[in-house]
Image (cartoon, coloured by chain):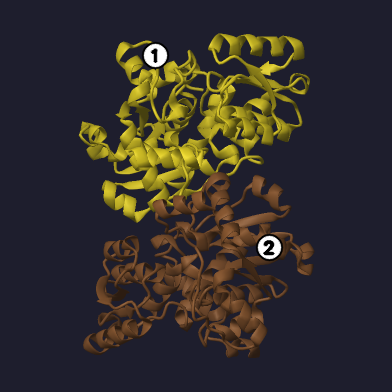
Chain colours: A yellow, B brown
Amino acid sequence: MEANEQKYAADISSIKEAHERIKPFIHKTPVLTSESLNSISGRSLFFKCECFQKGGAFKFRGACNAVLSLDAEQAAKGVVTHSSGNHAAALSLAAKIHGIPAYIVVPKGAPKCKVDNVIRYGGKVIWSESTMSSREKVASKVLQETGSVLIHPYNDGRVISGQGTVALELLEKIQEIDTIIVPISGGGLISGVALAAKSIKPSIRIIAAEPKGADDAAQSKVAGRIITLPVTNTIADGLRASLGDLTWPVVRDLVDDVVILEDGEIIEAMRMCYEILKVSVEPSGAIGLAAVLSKSFRSNPSWKDCKNIGIVLSGGNVDLGALWDSFRSS
Amino acid sequence: MEANEQKYAADISSIKEAHERIKPFIHKTPVLTSESLNSISGRSLFFKCECFQKGGAFKFRGACNAVLSLDAEQAAKGVVTHSSGNHAAALSLAAKIHGIPAYIVVPKGAPKCKVDNVIRYGGKVIWSESTMSSREKVASKVLQETGSVLIHPYNDGRVISGQGTVALELLEKIQEIDTIIVPISGGGLISGVALAAKSIKPSIRIIAAEPKGADDAAQSKVAGRIITLPVTNTIADGLRASLGDLTWPVVRDLVDDVVILEDGEIIEAMRMCYEILKVSVEPSGAIGLAAVLSKSFRSNPSWKDCKNIGIVLSGGNVDLGALWDSFRSS
């Protein structure tokens, strides 16, 4: 292991181990290309379609690795999370496959489709109030009562290692990629991708795509420390979390740039995913395409060197009604 | 060549030759699976995603094979069609790749998005009145003036051979498939798929999926001759054509059954493609999933033997506004 890898919660070895562990359970998602989108962007784009992953998002990779990393005694008592999004569904599914209980603390008022997903995958829903303090309190109670293990949605080395397998598969398939664009929220996906990709190909550029209404990662990079926002406001509901103490060092050191996108740009990219790429993505999933089409990235001095760009379409869990409303109001 | 293969406009040899010819130009489209849809249907489903094909539909395979089969002198004069749907866009794209002109006769009133596709792929649009006689008359005139070659959307051995490559790729990837469900319209796709699949695996079942408002193939099978309908009425706008004299013998002899679907069933399947499989399909593309979920197929005596089912998601070219209206009115 090289010295610089020891600094982080995951490294290329833990990511490769994760891949071996989760391979029998995950979908090796396809990489799609579109000459129309290449022509529009002026670049060769390679879309890693994690919307086709089990549970509809990359989250299953990390959740699956975390669950499969538990020893038998730990595992038998089950796992807990108080995320109500894609991680909750992914953890429920991973636990179901492993035959152990998943306790999902869900705040009152969470979207019905997300709660339905958790139930469909066999997660046990435990309601809390909508505040973070209530969610944490209820989760603590569950942990005490059941002896189960908390699996954080991103601030966990096992989860980061699992998410990094996206980059292993992408670079195995398309060696000529020189840039990877990854949506950023809590930083689990981009940390795993950056650690894997820069180990395999040190010259690769890792670009974070972040919505303007939740641009805490960009602010953190400028400040040199984790910035959390009191309020977030974006259509990309999967990208509102703040960096954790395990993801921040990776984002600080290995993410080359953060591109900030307006909601309108995200919606337009989402429409192109549906109409041109024929892929159903959620707003958070489309933000990477929005980045390559944005003025802010295209006026960046590094743009001229970004020729073969990997874009992680991170997820596809969207309510069709809400989707349509966003198209119409944009 | 076996005796029974000589009866038809294509055979396994012409289909394999087509595959070699078009391989450098087509997308080898992924086969997606969904445990949720397996659980809902009670079967193992394998979705061959031709919506990700160039031009957004399987049509590019046949058009590409037809164009590449022309000798240099023929090719230089270009190709013509009077289809205004996916075949027109596919033929334009195939001609563009080959560097020859494509003349597309388009009836006045054709949907703008389809005309836009033709133009985007470099086809030369020539307007006609909306009647079939006007379309044929204008096409004849173009043929005479340019010396170009008419490429029929389905009643053409080169086109049928190209479409059959869908089955080669599907069965190469998933050997255990025992049934393939294919949308039926003019019969080009299902003829190619049936000829390829039954040659590779004689026990395989080939099921046509057809909308109730354009059930001419089902009626033809009953009557023992080609039936054409004076009027068709279905949301599956790609499935309104009648069988041709080259596709009918294959459909008559090699298609085991025709499942008829209501528009409501097609729309529900389309919604599942978006929400569960995360794939954008057009109504015609979703009809195979509608079939495996339909009472009519599930009460068919052969259903119990259909365990591993290949479903061709034939295309994804849909206007998002029209799509949404169909979801809301259903």
Residue B111 in which image quadrant? bottom left
Which residue is at 39% across, 14% downward?
Answer: A229
Which residue is at 49% across, 16% downward?
Answer: A246
Q: Position of residue A114 (x, y in %)?
A: 58, 31
Amino acid type at image mark 2: Ile
Q: Position of residue A206 (x, y in %)?
A: 37, 31
Of A60 and A166, nearer the camera is A60
Q: Secondary structure at mark 2?
A: loop
Q: Position of residue B119 (x, y in %)?
A: 27, 65
The chain that hosts pointer 2 is B
Which residue is at 59% across, 90% downward?
Answer: B7
The answer to whether B94 is drawn above or below residue B318 in the figure is below
Amino acid type at image mark 1: Leu
Residue pointed to by mark 2: B177
The answer to whether A113 is drawn above or below residue B262 in the figure is above
Q: Position of residue A176 (x, y in %)?
A: 37, 45
The quadrant of the image that shows the C terminus of chain A is top left
Q: Is residue A128 visible?
A: yes
C-alpha distance separating marks 2 and 1: 52 Å
Q: Secondary structure at mark 1?
A: loop
B127 vs A99, left or right, is left
What crowding class fits label 2: few (fewer than 14 Cα within 10 Å), some (14-19), or many (20 or more)? many
Residue A137 in which image quadrant? top right
Which residue is at 33% across, 81% downward?
Answer: B135
The answer to whether B288 is drawn above or below residue A86 in the figure is below
Foreground tag (2 vs 1): 1
The answer to whether A51 is drawn above or below residue B216 in the figure is above
B108 vs A22, left or right, is left
B193 vs B92, left or right, is right
Of B198 and A134, nearer the camera is A134
Residue pointed to by mark 1: A229
